[in-house]
């Protein structure tokens, strides 16, 4: 059921940060783009991840984030997958480790994309309900 390849559902046009960017920049991107995960790269190589939770749990004011670097807070021990693994592998990593996103990298550890819990949910939903539910939504909303 989840035997398609990861690259079929991953977001390839990923917004990223560098380790020297500030948490203020990260916070602004997370809020303005309504996302929760920002991979951190040096060149194309994935070196970390910063999440909305990482920023929230610090409990600092927005002003305090302006001088802090992403490298001070980012997670560096990340579960990654390659684009030719199955979507089921993503689901397993997400559930096993309680993550909400998995960066997708090549054999050089270069970032190719990201898959989130939302991507897996959307994938499963569309498999279960291939027909558009627009009529139902219009009639009941």
Image (spheres, rainbow, N blue to C red):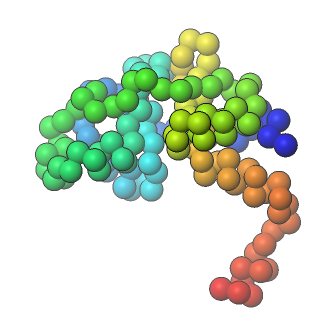
Image quadrant where residue 96 sits: top right
Image point 67% across, 40% down: which residue? 91
Residue 9, by quadrant, is: top right
Q: Residue 82 lies in what quarter of the image? A: top right
Quarter of the picture holding the N terminus: top right
Which residue lies at the image location 53% right of the left edge and 36% below the top edge? Answer: 97
Left or right, 135 with reference to 48: right
What x and y, as percent, mark residue 20? Answer: 26, 27
Q: Is residue 112 left or right of residue 129?
A: left
Relative vertical location of residue 122 with respect to residue 131 in this rendering, above or below:
above
Q: Left of 108 or right of it: where is 59?
A: left
Percent across and percent down for residue 123 are 74, 50
> Picture coordinates of residue 120 (x, y %)?
67, 47
What is the tally of numbered marks visible in this picture? 0
Can residue 112 be seen by looking at this rendering? no
Q: Residue at x 39, y 24 (%)?
A: 76
Q: Where 73 sits versus 123, above or below?
A: above
Q: Position of residue 93 (x, y in %)?
A: 61, 34
| Residue at the farthest top position | 108
> Which residue is situated farthest in the front direction here?
96
Of the pair 95 and 128, the residue shown nearer to us: 95
Question: Does any portion of residue 62 appear in the rendered image?
Answer: yes
In the picture, the quarter occupied by the C terminus is bottom right
| Image point (76%, 31%), residue name | 86
């Amino acid at each position: 059921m989840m035997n398609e390849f990861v690259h079929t559902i991953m977001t390839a046009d990923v917004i990223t940060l560098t380790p020297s960017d500030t948490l203020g920049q990260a916070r602004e991107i997370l809020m303005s783009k309504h996302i929760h995960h920002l991979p951190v790269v040096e060149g194309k190589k994935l070196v970390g991840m910063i999440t909305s939770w990482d920023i929230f749990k610090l409990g600092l004011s927005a002003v305090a984030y302006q001088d802090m670097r992403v490298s001070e807070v980012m997670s560096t021990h990340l579960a990654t997958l390659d684009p030719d693994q199955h979507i089921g592998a993503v689901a397993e990593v997400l559930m096993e480790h309680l993550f909400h996103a998995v960066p997708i990298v090549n054999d050089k550890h270069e970032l190719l994309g990201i898959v989130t819990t939302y991507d897996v949910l959307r994938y499963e939903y569309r498999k279960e309900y291939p027909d558009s539910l627009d009529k139902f939504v219009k009639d009941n909303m």
